[in-house]
Amino acid sequence: MSERKAWQELELGVELPAATSLGYKTGGWRVLRPVWNASECTHCMICVSYCPDMAIPVTKSEEGVAGKGGRMFKGIVRLETNLDYCKGCGICAHECPTKCISIIREEEAEQAACKL
Amino acid sequence: MGVKKAITGAQAAAEAMRQINPDVVVAYPITPQTPIVEQFAKYVADGIVDTEMVPVESEHSAMSAAVGAETAGARAMSATSSQGLALMWEVVAATPGLRLPIVMSLVNRALSAPINIHCDHSDVMGVTTVGWIQIFSENAQEVYENTLLAIRVAEDKRIQLPAMVNQDGFITSHAVEPVEIFDDALVRKFVGVRSLDRALLDVEHPRSVGPLVLPDYYFEFKRAQEEAMSKVFEVYREVGTELSAITGKQYPFFETYRTDDAEAVVVVLNSAAGTAKAAVDAVRAQGKKVGMLKPILFRPFPYTEVRDALRHVPVVGVLDRSMDFGAYAPVYSEFRNALWELDKRPSMQSYIYGLGGRDIMTTEIEAVFEELLSGELDPEHQRYIGLRG
């Protein structure tokens, strides 16, 4: 839960509002982070369908996005991984046929961000 | 005025359930609880109550089904003893956290091993820490009235906690005695119907019940549960006053018997309190000032009131019908705690009696009074009444 109530405000018993999973930012559990190299991606959707947290969003692109070999991929394409919900399990990297996803440790990602 | 019937403690519990007319009763038979469910099943079969009776394959399922029914908004009741309570423990412990006001008869029976079907309090003393309201009954009449009282206290909006109504196995549950059953219409008006404001099947107000709650919230839920428990005292008094209008009786947290000028008092739960009163009379006839205190509301425990009631008493003996191996016995522990705050603390002695249904005699309690008055006490070590060797 994102909002934290005091005990006096709690409803009777262990009852919570329904449909609250969006409020749980499970990405906070992550130790490993997937790094997506868009220029090697074929937008095959394998990573999207394997992701157990549905943390790889997709969109429809009429004009197309540049991918592997400089080719333009039109139609349904993937976007950057949503790090609010990605738990860093690495299935996307494991399944990727073009090996365009690499896995790095969270602290490496944080150090890289600090250098920038 | 009610009608006097010659019935057992088990039938007295069933009579209260007949008048309460719960939506659902779920139970699995176990000696000595069985006659409660037998009698109630007859009421269901004869169309005297509207209850849905759910036969289940174990006590774990019994309490689970009661939890399901109460979550949906029904008023559900159950009854068990000893091993049955032990088997349903997981769900018994979950019920107060879910804030479901299930009322259950507990017919006190010794816990295995060795296996034994007779009375002691080792079953209930294993669940006093999980958050049920605990009410004890000396006889069949008290079983009947305490069950009616328990429903209203448990279901009160300020409380919403489950309650167990205890009676001694066989001694109370199977002994026939005259019980005054009060007018159906008056009792039903008193009992009322369970408010549906928290029913799960409310599509306008969807909510999650029984979710995973991690370190960020568990603590707060438990604190809220304790707050509800602390309000039981005021609600118990209010509901007791309402019930008095029907029965003409009082509903104190505990009963005191000839304690006003007493120089020694014994504390004892349930049916043995009757024996202790006879012993008090016998010792008083010899000119010695003794008395008895019988706890009724055991959870929450009325520490302040107990302290005030025993403030003037120089010697207190506490009789426990169960042990807490390697520690002070459960009832003794509470009284030792309660009296700690006094400026002038009494001498105390812990006694264990009646395990596995062993009888306790008035002469044995008279001997306890002699010992208490003699001053030869050892508050660090419990003594055993009626034990060979």
Image (spheres, coloured by chain):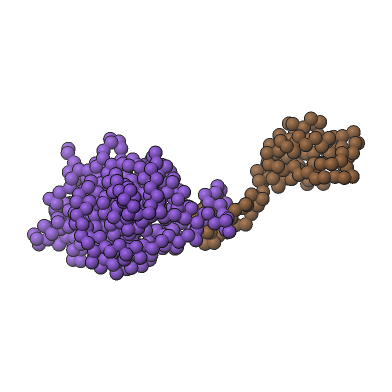
Instruction: Please give the count of numbered marks on the rendered protein.
Output: 0
Question: Which of A83 and A60 lies nearest the eye of the viewer?
Answer: A60
Q: Can residue B355 be seen?
A: no
Where is residue B264? Give x, y as percent. 19, 59
- Relative placement, left or right, of A33 versus B67 is right
Percent from the top left, x then y, of residue B90?
43, 43
> Which residue is pictured at 55% across the width and 47% down the height?
B212
Q: Is B243 on the left-hand or right-hand side of B208? A: left
Among the chains pictured, the one given purple colouring is B
The residue shown at (83%, 35%) is A42
Who's brown, chain-wise?
A
Q: Residue furthest top?
A: A97
Q: Residue at point 44% right, 63% down?
A: B158
Q: Which of the image's four quarters has the N terminus of chain B?
A: bottom left
Q: Position of residue B96 (x, y in %)?
A: 44, 52
Residue appearing at x 68%, y 37% in the figure: A89
Q: Quadrant of the C terminus of chain B?
A: top left
